[in-house]
Image (spheres, rainbow, N blue to C red):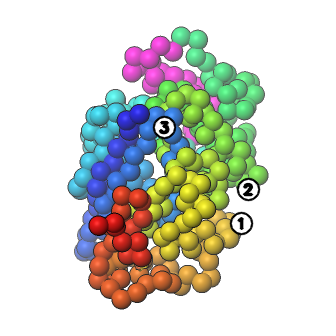
Amino acid sequence: RGALLSVDDLVVQYRRPGAPPTRAVAGVSLEVRAGEVVGLVGESGCGKSTLARAVCGLTPSEEGSISFDGTPVRPLGVRRRDPALTSIQMVFQDPYGSLNPRRRVGAQIADGIRTAAGRGEDVDGATPEDLLTRVGLPADAATRYAQEFSGGQRQRIAIARALAARPRLLVADEPISALDASAQLHVARLMRSLAVESGAGLLFISHDLSVVRLIADRIAVMYLGQIVETGITAEVWDNPRHPYTQALLAAIPQPDGAGLLPAELPGDIPDPAAPPSGCRFHPRCPRAFDGCDREVPLLSDDGVACRLYPAAA
Ligand code: SF4
Ligand code: MG
């Protein structure tokens, strides 16, 4: 199977007056295939959300390319998307802000059905009630308002609305981090099963490796705008190679989801506007050695960007 989404050497930059440009995404390559779940993991501020927005055609890139089913993804302007991109749907972190409090849930899901119809999909017989049932809510939720539901239920409604648009790719940016611990795994597993069942790809973005590993086929670990390790989920979990991935795995997630890093990993994530020289992880790396502050490690063919694993000659 070819890639549904293909991101190649992508650079996304922010400009602020009086400050040097910040490369929030600094050369990322990534693929998602149809029916595949890819988990993108990293600390907040590492560029995950910026990458997600670029993939959805919501933010322009500086260099590199994104293609969706062979078509380039480019934003048309502020808040405007190419209608062809409606087969990429996003689920956001905040299920409170992403639903309209003044419209009934069913009407908001019907918007998604109309989006699919507008793209020429056959939506005969598609109803908000069916979609609500698919995400595990009662059909009569359609007649109610978002604020009558819990955070986890609201995220299910947001997922139903995204699914209504018949996406071929779902991009979920921290979709569970605002939910109660008890709802997190349910919603993550639901997203996986709905994506796999409909043959869509799912890019599931989270800081929580312990949840991602339960639903992703492949994992990509991001640090300061770059992917430092990628591979089959079980292989990354059982045999993490990059010192940053090793640190993430050694970490105990905090209940509030804020701090993920273990005590033995010093320092905060550096300012992406002024990334460290050489390996961007070197100031925090417990295994840094001579030259790590000068030489930039590239992602090898077997999916790790660290000088401890030199590429085979
Ligand atoms: Fe650590 Fe050096 Fe590998 Fe970077 S290249 S992760 S500093 S060992
Ligand atoms: Mg984010």
Labels 1 and 3: the sequence-earlier one: 3
Q: Position of residue 107 (x, y in %)?
A: 58, 25
- Whether residue 37 sits left or right of residue 6 in the image: it is right
Camera-side residue of 180 and 265? 265
Would residue 94 be visible to someone looking at this image?
A: no
Magenta residue span? 99-123
Which quadrant: the C terminus?
bottom left
Q: Position of residue 32 (x, y in %)?
A: 43, 43
Labels 3 and 2: the sequence-earlier one: 2
Q: Position of residue 206 (x, y in %)?
A: 55, 56
Which residue carries the number 2 mark?
A: 181
Disc 2 packing (10 Å; few <14; some 14–19; many ≥20): some
Which residue carries the number 1 mark?
A: 255
The numbered dot on residue 201 is 3
Q: From the viewer's perspective, is residue 273 above or below residue 267?
A: above
- Whether residue 83 sits left or right of residue 44 in the image: it is left
Quadrant for residue 161, please give it.
top right
